[in-house]
Image (cartoon, helix red, strand yellow):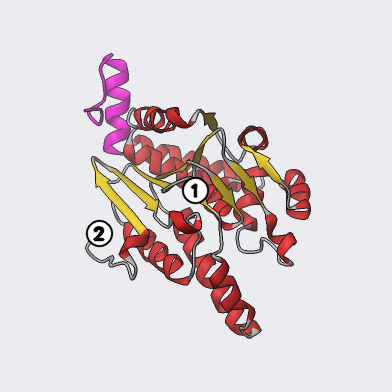
Amino acid sequence: MHSEYTPKRPESLIVEDADGILTVTLNRPDVHNAFDETLIDDLHRLFRSLSDRADLLAVILTGAGESFSAGADLNWMKRAADHTQHANFEDAMRLSNMMDALYALPMTTIAKVNGTAMGGGLGLCACCDIAVAADPAQFALSEVRLGIIPGVISPYVIQAIGIRESHRWFQTGERFGAAEALRMGLLHAVCAPEALEEAVDAILRELKKGSPDAIRASKTLLREVAGRQLDDTTRRETAQRIAGQRATREGREGLSAFLEKRKPDWIA
């Protein structure tokens, strides 16, 4: 773990750091890995501590027990009910900052959805670059049934599933299964629970075939180009990006390896 990160409640997170892969397990199975202000703060500081980790290929986020994350802890929500509007705003911003820190990580992020993901738990899934779920997993944006809205997570969810799908799920609050989440684009793959580990490992094996620098540059490219108008400025900028990448050490090594019919040196 990064030396600058010290959790306030260490037992709520399990962090495993090995061979360029960091796995973060939400460890509150008794409350279905729901998050309160302490867990939000711990996750935020953890994600921020990883932002300069050039040695990491991927960060995997998963849950202990039967659930991925049920979203907001009920006791936390009860406390928030007595807050002033400004205090509620500050509370929501802490959650927003944590989500943004996950979304902004430069390395590949993978949601390993072992079970139910509700509300903010679904938001965590949407913040990750890749999401794989066990087929019994259930999902919901159930905030309207509690008299609230999926405000903080909405940019990430809408980006993942699109505006049309969001119109339904934001307003009905109904549950849907992994197959439906796959259809709408929230998930990239669904598998049997016993195959979840191997499904994520298969993705990691594919990631390891790519240039680490190019993978990070591709993630940056997506963030900065998606949704922009296709005009001369965008075309010139994207041409400059690939020209710059071709000139990097890994860019030259990748082309040489291809022409010489050998594996590039980033593949062990």
- Packing grade of label 1 (10 A; few <14, some 14-19, many >=20) is many
Q: Position of residue 34 (x, y in %)?
A: 51, 59
Front disc: 1 or 2: 1
Query: What amino acid type is highlighted by mark number 2?
Result: His
Residue range of the region highlighted in magenta in the rendering: 248-268
Seen from the viewer's position, the closer of residues 145 and 54 is 145
Q: Quadrant of residue 70?
A: bottom right
Residue visible at 77% across and 44% down in the picture: 164
Q: Which residue is mark 2?
A: 2
Is residue 251 a member of the stretch shown in magenta? yes
Residue visible at 54% across and 71% down in the picture: 75
Residue visible at 65% across and 57% down in the picture: 154
Label 1 element class: strand
Residue visible at 65% across and 83% down in the picture: 85
Q: Earlier in the sequence, mark 1 or mark 2?
A: 2
Spatial CA span between label 1 and label 2: 24 Å
Is residue 259 a member of the stretch shown in magenta? yes
Q: Which residue is mark 1?
A: 68
Residue 176's place in the image compared with 39, above or below, is: above
Label 2 element class: loop
